[in-house]
């Protein structure tokens, strides 16, 4: 029997926010599927743990995605460590819940920087490197909040809606370079970040979070389920897929 080659064998990927939650699950799945990774995160201690776990398959890069020079340096790390870059996963996101009229201008700008600007920098600085290798794939992580905003989530929802528009614009502009750009839109996934935000989310939804997840989508999503979709979109299996906004919600929006 012929053993199939790993889905991402020979591919080089950069994952932002790779140290925790969805990012950590994505990094684990890409490595499982044969990729070598630059794992980028602001948490240096957690990055060291990742590097210990995966050895030479994962090179750490401390990176604040709100800093364009840091994102550019993380892309450069892929070139220095592995000779190029084929896949980028722009995963970083989050914000403190505040009602719209209570958000200070600097807080609004911080939400845009974290959730939107970091994706822009990831695309801007990685695209030429991907093009140099004949193309590649970019996967952005959005949120169901982009289309179903809740009380206190106005800045986050706005930024994530812009990520979806940016995904489609980038897919159109970068197609000629052989670069596909898609977004995954998760609903409620069971991550440490979601649990830390439990109080804010319950106030936003006006319901117990566990009960809300069961009622709206049957159960909590598992990070490894999202990671599997990201791996597919990053792979040659999805070679004719670009500009897609992939809603991963188990019927939540129905």
Image (cartoon, rainbow, N blue to C red):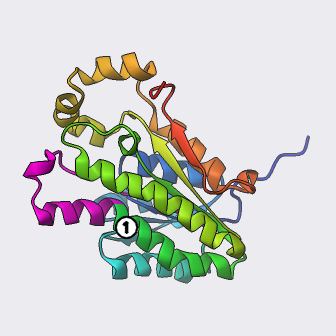
- Snapshot quadrant of residue 138: bottom right
What's the residue at 53%, 44% (across, down)? 227
- Tell me where residue 252 appears, x and y as whole percent: 45, 26
One can see residue 133 in this view: yes
The residue lying toward the viewer, choosing from 231 and 66, is: 66
Pick out the residue farthest to the front.
101
**Badge 1 local density, few (<14 within 10 Å), some, or many (20+)?**
many
The residue lying toward the viewer, choosing from 220 and 179, is: 179
- 44 on left or right of 4: left
Which residue, given by chain and number where applicable, does mark 1 sit on?
118
The correct choice, above or below, for 124 with respect to 34 in the image is: below
- 152 on left or right of 236: left
Pick out the residue farthest to the right.
1
One can see residue 53 in this view: no
What's the residue at 28%, 43% (across, down)? 193
- 180 on left or right of 150: right
- Tell me where residue 248 appears, x and y as whole percent: 51, 36
What's the residue at 35%, 78% (across, down)? 68
- 44 on left or right of 186: left
What's the residue at 24%, 52% (across, down)? 155
Q: Secondary structure at mark 1?
A: helix
The correct choice, above or below, for 172 with respect to 234 in the image is: below
- Tell me where residue 131 appears, x and y as whole percent: 66, 78
- Snapshot quadrant of residue 176: bottom right
Task: Reply yes or no: does residue 112 show up in magenta.
Answer: yes
Q: Which residues are magenta?
A: 87-115
The correct choice, above or below, for 60 with respect to 189 in the image is: below
Quadrant of the rendering where the N terminus is positioned: top right
- Tell me where residue 184 appears, x and y as whole percent: 51, 47
Task: Reply yes or no: does residue 178 show up in magenta.
Answer: no
């Amino acid at each position: 029997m012929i053993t199939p080659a790993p889905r991402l064998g020979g591919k080089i990927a950069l994952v932002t926010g790779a140290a925790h939650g969805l990012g950590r699950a994505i990094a684990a799945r890409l490595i499982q599927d044969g990729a070598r990774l630059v794992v980028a995160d602001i948490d240096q201690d957690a990055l060291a743990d990742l590097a210990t776990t995966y050895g030479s398959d994962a090179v750490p890069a401390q990176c604040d995605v709100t800093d364009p020079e840091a994102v550019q340096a993380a892309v450069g790390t892929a070139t220095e460590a592995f000779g190029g870059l084929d896949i980028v996963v722009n995963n970083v996101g989050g914000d403190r819940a505040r009602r719209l009229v209570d958000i200070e201008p600097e807080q609004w700008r911080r939400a845009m920087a974290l959730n939107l600007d970091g994706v822009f920098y990831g695309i801007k600085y990685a695209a030429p490197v991907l093009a140099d290798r004949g193309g590649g794939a970019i996967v952005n992580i959005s949120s169901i909040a982009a289309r179903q905003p809740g009380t206190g989530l106005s800045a986050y929802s706005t930024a994530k809606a812009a990520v979806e528009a940016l995904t489609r614009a980038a897919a159109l502009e970068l197609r000629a370079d052989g670069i596909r750009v898609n977004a995954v839109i998760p609903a409620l996934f069971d991550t440490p970040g979601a649990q830390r935000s439990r109080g804010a989310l319950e106030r936003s939804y006006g319901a117990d979070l566990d009960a809300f997840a069961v009622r709206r989508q049957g159960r909590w999503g598992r990070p490894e389920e999202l990671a599997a979709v990201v791996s597919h979109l990053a792979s040659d299996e999805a070679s004719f897929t670009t500009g897609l906004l992939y809603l991963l919600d188990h019927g939540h929006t129905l």
